[in-house]
């Protein structure tokens, strides 16, 4: 066993199949999208090379600019609406409260549900005629709204179930990080007179920064490449008010048969995710240097 662990050839024997699959499933499609993004092509006829024209057209496309703005709004909403409540719940549950396992399971249930199921559930909740949300508002004497058909409300109405679904996911990640902090550190803080709030802000949070980085990365990157729940709820409507780059890309490729423009959007999503990943890495490197 020791000999095999010290053998670099053995590493390659086990890693190589997974590496090949990863390259084929990830980098080959990205490379193909990059190639198609330089073409004017309908997916059937001849390809015409047009260079960077598809990318230039994206910057002139109001629908695309709206979708990019919406994805950034969702990224911010995910940080505020997912990570802050998730951190609060994780801090509370990790203090060995009564019913800890029960609450942990309840918070995680939305993560286990299919996105399509959640989308259909909120379609019923938001329905302007018989939806539960309007029924509750009308019981208080307030006027009901067409939540998914009104440009004023559709963005918030679309983003709420997305943010709600993954609070439990991030809570569990942060909860695991908090549980890994040695109990002796908390005991020492208590001896020094620290209360629960001081231990949370000055002991727990600084010690789980690596876990918070993972959770922040998942939240932001997941928001930037979101597709399924927006598609189920609104398909990007009305008038692109809830559009995100992935839904616009899907419509461009499979509805309007604009493979070049759609591929340029795909490359934009990939680059956007990489940029935000490196920004998050840089942010935590700077934060670690301050301690």
Image: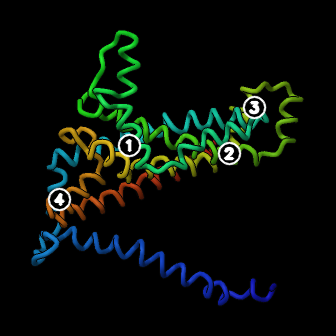
Mark 3 neighbour class, 10 Å CA radius: few under 14, some 14 to 19, many 20 or more: some
Above or below, 80 relative to 251: above
Label 3 to label 2, Cα distance in Å?
13 Å
* Residue labelled with disc 4: 255
Tag 4 near tag 2, CB within 8 Å: no
Badge 1 or badge 2: first in the primary sequence: 1
Residue at the spot 79% in from the left edge and 36% down from the top edge: 96
Distance from disc 1 to disc 2, alpha carbons, whole Å, reads 36 Å
> Which badge, 1 or 3, comes first in the chain's sequence?
1
Q: Name the residue under label 1.
A: 120
Q: Name the residue under label 2.
A: 208
Question: Judging from the image, what secondary structure is the residue with disc 4 in?
Answer: loop
Mark 4 surroundings: few (<14), some (14-19) or many (≥20) residues within 10 A? few
As measured in the structure, the alpha-carbon distance from the residue carrying label 4 to the one carrying label 3 is: 54 Å
Separation of marks 4 and 1 at Cα, in angstroms: 23 Å
Look at the image and tell me in which quarter the C terminus lies.
top right
**SS for dot 1:** helix
Residue at image coords 54%, 40%: 167
* Marks 4 and 1, the one that precedes in the sequence: 1
Q: Earlier in the sequence, mark 4 or mark 3?
A: 3
Mark 3 lies on residue: 199
Q: What element carries label 3?
A: helix
> Which residue corresponds to the image point at 39% horizontal and 73% vertical from the top-left?
27
Q: Is residue 55 left or right of residue 83?
A: left
Location of the N terminus (image quadrant)? bottom right
Residue 128 found in image quarter: top left
Q: In the rendered structure, are the residues bearing label 4 and label 1 in contact, judged by CB atoms less than 8 Å apart?
A: no
């Amino acid at each position: 066993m020791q000999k095999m662990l010290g053998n670099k050839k053995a590493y390659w024997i086990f890693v190589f199949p997974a590496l090949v699959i990863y390259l084929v499933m990830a980098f080959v499609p990205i490379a193909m999208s990059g190639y198609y993004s330089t073409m004017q092509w309908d997916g059937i006829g001849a390809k015409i090379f047009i260079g960077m024209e598809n990318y230039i057209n994206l910057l002139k496309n109001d629908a695309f600019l709206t979708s990019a703005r919406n994805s950034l709004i969702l990224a911010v909403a995910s940080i505020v609406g997912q990570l802050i409540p998730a951190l609060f719940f994780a801090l509370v549950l990790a203090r060995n409260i009564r019913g800890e396992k029960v609450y942990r399971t309840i918070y995680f249930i939305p993560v286990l549900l299919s996105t399509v199921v959640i989308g259909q559930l909120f379609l019923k909740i938001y329905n302007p005629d018989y939806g539960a949300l309007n029924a509750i508002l009308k019981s208080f004497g307030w006027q009901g709204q067409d939540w998914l058909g009104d440009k004023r409300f559709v963005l918030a109405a679309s983003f709420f179930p997305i943010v709600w679904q993954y609070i439990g996911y991030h809570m569990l990640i942060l909860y695991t990080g908090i549980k890994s902090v040695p109990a002796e550190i908390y005991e020492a803080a208590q001896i020094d007179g620290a209360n629960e709030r001081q231990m949370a802000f000055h002991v727990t949070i600084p010690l789980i920064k690596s876990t918070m980085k993972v959770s922040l990365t998942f939240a932001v990157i997941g928001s930037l490449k979101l597709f399924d729940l927006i598609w189920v709820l609104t398909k990007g409507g009305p008038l692109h008010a809830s559009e995100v780059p992935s839904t616009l890309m899907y419509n461009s490729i499979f509805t309007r048969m604009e493979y070049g423009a759609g591929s340029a959007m795909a490359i934009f999503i990939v680059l956007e995710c990489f940029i935000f990943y490196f920004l998050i890495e840089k942010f935590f490197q700077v934060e670690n240097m301050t301690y």
